[in-house]
Amino acid sequence: MRTCGRTPVRRNKELIADRNRISRQTVGGGMKQNQTPQLNAKIRMYPAQGKGKADLLGFADLTIGGAFVIRSIRIMQINPERAGGEISDPFISFPSRRVAAEGEERYFDVAHPITSDAYRAAADVILSKYQESAAKGASV
C-alpha cells in the first residue's frame, strides 16, 4: 500500500478485489437474487376499536429467512361505520415513525418490502396466519 502524505492510497487491483469480495458476500451467500426467502409470522391478537377510519385487529412479527425479524406490523381493517363505506378485507401496515418538522407531521417507514412481490408474499403469510388465529380465537 502506498501513502500520499498521511492518507493511504490503494492500487486499482486492491480496490477491484475488495469490491468483488464484498459482492460475493452479499449476493452469493446461498440465496440467488430475486428469490424470496422463507417467511414466517407470529400473530398477537389485539381487538380494539380505534378513533380513526380503521380498527386495529392485531400485530405481527415477520421472520425473514430465519435470520431477520420485523416487529409490530399492524393488521387493520377499515371500519365501514366511521369510513362511510363497505366492509373491507384486513390489510397490513409496516412500522413507521412520526416525525414533526417545521410544524408539519410526516410518517417514515422503519422497515418495509422494496418490491411488490415481496410485499404480497409478506401480506399473504401474515394475513393467512391472522385468519388461522382468528378462527382459533388465540394468538399464533
Image (spheres, rainbow, N blue to C red):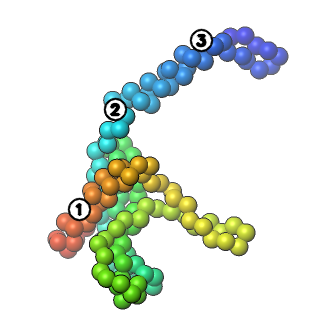
Which quadrant of the structure image shows residue 93? bottom left
Question: Badge 3, how many Cα within 10 Å: few under 14, some, many 20+?
Answer: few
Q: Which residue is mark 3?
A: 13
Q: Is residue 46 visible?
A: no
Residue sitting farthest toward the front:
85
Q: Which mark is residue 32?
A: 2
Q: CA distance from mark 3 to mark 2?
A: 27 Å
Identify which amino acid the numbered label 1 is placed on: Ser
Give the position of the N terminus as an image quadrant.
Answer: top right
Q: Do tag 1 and tag 2 residues touch (Cβ < 8 Å)? A: no
Residue located at (79% from left, 15% from top): 4
Horizontally, residue 105 falls left or right of residue 54, namely: right
Can you say whether 128 is above or below 25 in the image? below
Identify which amino acid the numbered label 3 is placed on: Lys
Give the position of the C terminus as an image quadrant.
Answer: bottom left
Residue located at (39% from left, 67% from top): 74
Nearer-N-terminus badge (3/1): 3
Nearer-N-terminus badge (1/2): 2
Helix, strand or loop at mark 1 = helix
Q: Which residue is mark 1?
A: 128
Q: Which mark is residue 21?
A: none
Can you say whether 110 is above or below 17 in the image? below
Please provide percent x and percent y for residue 15. 60, 18
Question: Badge 1, how many Cα within 10 Å: few under 14, some, many 20+?
Answer: few
